[in-house]
Amino acid sequence: MTSVNPVGADRSAAIPNVGSSVAATPPAEPTAAIAHFASLLAFETDCWDVHDAMSRGVQDFVLLDVRSPDLYASGHVPGAVNLPHGRIVQRNLASYPVDTLFVVYCAGPHCNGADKAALRLAQLKRPVKKMIGGVTGWLDEGFELATASERAGLADSG
């Protein structure tokens, strides 16, 4: 049945009540949701958990800022090592044991540099997680950036 509203008439009468776009697609069954969210946690961590670990001195990972050296110098997560995603190759990781967990981040959700870095690390058979939110998320949590190079970064041999 099609409703036609004359000009100036109440248009809501012609629009069928279908509910919200949120509920238009039914949610996943609980077992599927468990698998999905557990999988996400295997691939990602967040700024709060990284900050908490570092604050407690439990940094059992290497935090990589995969942006350019200039962006790193202008502000980075304290304790992060700068290794742009395009320079993630085996020779630049040689000083780390093969089971080292790398946590990568870039500018924020609008940047896919962390995804590119995570892919490269996985292709090199290195454990990796992405810090969701990147620099934007770090600042949104109220954490400070370091602006002076605390560490020179990984030796880049090419």
Image (tube, rainbow, N blue to C red):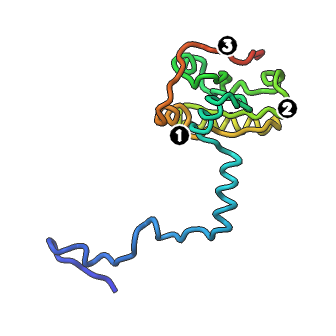
Outermost residue on the left side: it is: 8
Which numbered dot is residue 34? Answer: none
Quadrant where the C terminus is found in the figure:
top right
Question: How far is disc 3 from disc 2 in space, using C-alphas?
Answer: 21 Å
Q: Which mark is residue 152?
A: 3
- Asked if residue 65 is positioned above or below residue 42 in the image, the reply reads above
Q: Residue at x 53, y 35 (%)?
A: 108
Mark 2 residue crowding within 10 angstroms, few (<14) / some (14–19) / many (20+)? few
Q: CA distance from mark 3 to mark 1?
A: 26 Å
Q: Position of residue 28 (x, y in %)?
A: 60, 68
> Residue 98 placed where, x, y %?
85, 32
Residue located at (40% from left, 68% from top): 20
Q: Depth check: give the residue in front, 70 or 58.
A: 58
Q: Residue at x 52, y 33 (%)?
A: 138
Total tally of numbered discs in the picture: 3
**x and y percentages locating residue 99 in the rendered image:** 83, 34
Query: Which residue type carries mark 3?
Result: Ala
Residue annotated with mark 2:
98
Q: Identify the element where label 2 is drawn.
A: loop
Reading the image, the residue beneath label 1 is 109
Question: Is residue 16 or residue 7 the one in the foreground?
Answer: 16
